Amino acid sequence: MSETINLTLKIWRQKNSASAGQFVSYEMPGVSTHMSFLEMMDVLNEKLISKGEEPVAFDHDCREGICGMCSMFISGRAHGKLKGTTTCQLHMRHFADGEIITVEPWRAAPFPVIKDLVVDRTPLDKIIQAGGYVSVNTGSAQDANCLPVPKKDADEAMDAAACIGCGACVAACKNASAMLFLSAKVSQLALLPQGQPERKERILNMLSAHDEAGFGNCTNTGACEAECPKEISISHIARLNREFLGANV
Amino acid sequence: MVGWFRITSYICVLKNLIPMNQLVKIINSSVGRKLIMALTGLFLCTFLLEHLYGNILLYNNDGGEAFDEYSHSMVHNLLIRIVEVLLFAAIIVHAFQGIVLTRKNAAARPVNYAIKKDSETSSWFSRNMMLTGAFVLFFIVVHLYSFFVPYRISGLDEGQAVSQLVKESFENGWYSLFYFVSVLLLASHLNHGFQSAFQTMGINNKKYSPLIKIGGTAFAVLIFLGFASFPVVFYFGWMG
Ligand code: FES
């Protein structure tokens, strides 16, 4: 395998939320295959800055696949075509020499573009604020052994808790639904004893927040679980549906 | 006046029994809407089986007698007549809700991607429910017009049996082709819809979900082979 590849990037450039955007092409010769996608973007930005041009704005933070900030729609796939991977963990060795790569921001009504590839994902925070927590008003945490949790439940709750809130599920869903995100947040608490007191209000309030934000409705296509960098299963959406039924009857 | 008062007081009692606000909230929520899709959809699936059973009587080598008798008994069965009303209601609700959901979902993504490789992440069937559903709805309207209306409303021609009407309709190649394609699209609709309904009702686990998926596809194939056989058999005149 050659150590460097030549690429053409077609990147969505948009000055701010009010202006119209368009694609701009950039030639990227000699990209090291050991770079991550974000490092490649850094190289591009350094070039742009040295030429006196505006660098491409994109979200990132941990660069180790745990924060959920990076959010690029790469050649038709959320976080690129690699399974179970965030953009920051996607390496250039997965691209071919001479490839044209299209980079777009997440597209959804509740996620307006702020600039270039950066979108506003606060509606996801609004969903959490509506009930994605456990109220503990006093005292310190008790001994963990006082609250027995079956291994199976603990494992499933952990799987759901792996959600990093990146919004790839929304980006990939043909309906721009945030149901996988919502279900992961509902599921992780519904499975644990700490989540029980607020269980019923939680699902109702969080679902209202989801719907009010303007996310679409889930039609069970499964695109979300295919694109989720944490490979969260839509079985959590089924649990969310059960929680909804349980809270209403 | 007293009677009117009594009615309004009954309504008040009923209102307290069923918290209307909550009901409206459930029905208007995204999960509530898809529950309605799932329940009406599964109900319509049971109808398909019943309909297929009835049609298969056409294959009895008796000049359509069994089929005509069956049709007659269905029309004169009170229970069936009540279920028939529910059936029409289910079709209307399912179609209406499907349109509402499709519009809402389109509004949730006002700007489309330049490139989106959906086929790598989801099935064609799951993404085209509105398309296949709309075609099936159109088919239902035509289908009702060609069989239900003459049989139940405008009346058949003098001395004509309903089995005769069916066989004659399939002698028209275009009609048979239209029927065949509609059944194919109906099967596509069912292939996703059947298993999707279970997911919506919260049934998804490692043990049963693969079975439900296979069952959904098997059901779709059964419906396709069953119904698609009629235009083929009668158009090519393989049965008298
Ligand atoms: S930058 Fe934190 S997950 Fe990619």
Image: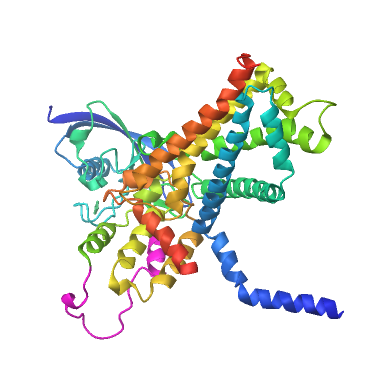
Q: Position of residue B183 (x, y in %)?
A: 57, 30
Question: Based on the displayed image, in which of its 4 quarters is residue A227 positioned?
Answer: top left
The reply to whether residue B128 is in sight is no
Residue nearest the viewer, comparing A90 with A13: A90
In the rendered image, the vertical position of residue B117 relative to residue A219, given as above or below: above
In the rendered image, the vertical position of residue B122 relative to residue B146, given as above or below: below
Residue nearest the viewer, comparing B7 with B159: B159
Q: Position of residue A18 (x, y in %)?
A: 48, 52
The reply to whether residue A32 is in sight is yes
Residue nearest the viewer, comparing A51 with B80: B80
Q: Position of residue B96 (x, y in %)?
A: 63, 48
Left or right: residue A202 compared with residue A154: right
Residue in the picture at 50% in, 62% down? A212
Tell me if residue A134 is in the magenta stretch: yes
Tell me if residue B218 is in the magenta stretch: no
Q: Which residues are magenta?
A: A121-149
Question: Based on the displayed image, in which of its 4 quarters is residue B4 positioned?
Answer: bottom right
Residue in the picture at 29% in, 58% down? A160
Q: Position of residue A155 (x, y in %)?
A: 22, 60
Question: Based on the displayed image, in which of its 4 quarters is residue B234 positioned?
Answer: top right
In the rendered image, the vertical position of residue B13 relative to residue A80, given as above or below: below
Left or right: residue B56 compared with residue A114: right
Residue in the picture at 39% in, 55% down? A237
Work out which quarter of the rendered image holds the N terminus of chain A and state it.
top left
Residue in the picture at 30% in, 80% down? A136
Furthest-bottom residue in view? Answer: A139
